[in-house]
Image (cartoon, helix red, strand yellow):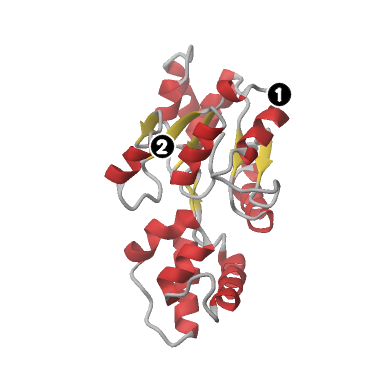
């Protein structure tokens, strides 16, 4: 099972773009992309904080959070793309006969159109999709991961969860799943991220395939051809 932003999809360009659009509406200069990118995995709260220095409880926070989400909703597929190697990885997983799914804190209103455009339209069909509003509590609560495992009829201990955020690792541990840190994602400080205690770390998506048991290495090469 995969996190979405920062793991399957490089959505930071549109998230950062929405944050800068919000700054421009306030008469502020855009921030460098490199400044905003590390906060993409943490959602609207972190991006509004970085863009406008507003936090929950501040007078104008909620109005600006809603405005940020409205802007992002309009531009969410302008520049977002699957990370390199994701298609090849999913092909190899499907050839192996392994069920796979998505567990994200992104609201379904935003996540589902992106999943359709970036995956379903390319004939990749996750066996389960859990969004931030699917269960009563988001990650790092283990409930979304446990709900996904139940939907797949797979024991949590037989599941792997791949993500780039601390909440992903915490949720994996709480659900008693194997955790894989997507080091290529939106991680501000990789050295600190390694203290989260993920069981494995990958520098690119295709490395996941090489970790799967009983998967012949030539399936990786075959997957690359199929994904072209």
Give the residue number, with chain letter if any, for mark 1.
153
Q: Nearer the viewer, residue 205 or 56?
A: 56
Q: Residue at x 30, y 50 (%)?
A: 189
Q: Secondary structure at mark 1?
A: loop
Query: Residue 30: x, y in percent?
Result: 38, 77
- Packing grade of label 1 (10 A; few <14, some 14-19, many >=20) is few
Q: Is residue 56 above or below residue 37?
A: below
Q: Is residue 82 above or below residue 64?
A: above
Task: Report which quarter residue 32 is drawn in.
Answer: bottom left
In the picture provided, is 58 more to the left or to the right than 112? left
Q: Nearer the viewer, residue 184 or 107?
A: 107
In the picture provided, is 191 more to the left or to the right than 160? left
In the picture provided, is 145 more to the left or to the right than 134? left
Q: Residue furthest left?
A: 191
The answer to the question of whether label 2 and label 1 lie on touching residues, with beta carbons closer than 8 A, is: no
Q: Nearer the viewer, residue 58 or 89?
A: 58
Give the residue number, with chain letter if any, for mark 2.
181
Q: Residue furthest bottom?
A: 27
Q: CA distance from mark 2 to mark 1?
A: 24 Å
- Packing grade of label 2 (10 A; few <14, some 14-19, many >=20) is many
Earlier-in-chain disc, 2 versus 1:
1
Q: Nearer the viewer, residue 227 or 93?
A: 93
Q: Residue at x 64, y 40 (%)?
A: 144
Q: Residue at x 45, y 58 (%)?
A: 40
Residue 124 seen in the current view: yes
Q: Quadrant of the N terminus?
A: top right
Q: Residue at x 56, y 67 (%)?
A: 72
Q: Secondary structure at mark 2?
A: strand
Query: Residue 41: x, y in percent?
Result: 47, 53
């Amino acid at each position: 099972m995969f996190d979405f932003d920062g793991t399957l999809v490089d959505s930071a360009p549109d998230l950062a773009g929405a944050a800068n659009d919000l700054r421009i509406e306030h008469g502020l200069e855009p921030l460098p992309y490199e400044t905003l990118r590390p906060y993409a995995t943490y959602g609207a709260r972190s991006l509004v904080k970085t863009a406008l220095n507003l936090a929950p409880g501040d007078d104008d926070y909620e109005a600006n959070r809603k405005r940020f989400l409205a802007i992002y909703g309009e531009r969410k597929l302008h520049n977002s793309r699957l990370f390199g190697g994701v298609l090849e990885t999913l092909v190899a997983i499907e050839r192996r006969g392994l069920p796979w799914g998505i567990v994200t804190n992104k609201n379904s209103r935003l996540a589902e159109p992106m999943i359709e455009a970036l995956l379903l339209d390319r004939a990749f069909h996750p066996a389960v999709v859990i969004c931030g509003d699917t269960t009563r509590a988001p990650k790092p609560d283990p409930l979304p991961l446990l709900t996904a495992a139940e939907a797949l009829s797979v024991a949590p201990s037989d599941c792997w969860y791949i993500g780039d955020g601390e909440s992903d690792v915490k949720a994996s541990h709480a659900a008693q799943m194997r955790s894989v840190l997507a080091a290529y994602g939106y991680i501000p400080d990789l050295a600190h991220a390694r203290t989260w205690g993920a069981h494995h770390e990958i520098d690119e998506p295709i490395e996941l395939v090489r970790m799967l048991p009983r998967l012949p290495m030539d399936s990786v090469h075959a997957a690359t051809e199929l994904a072209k």
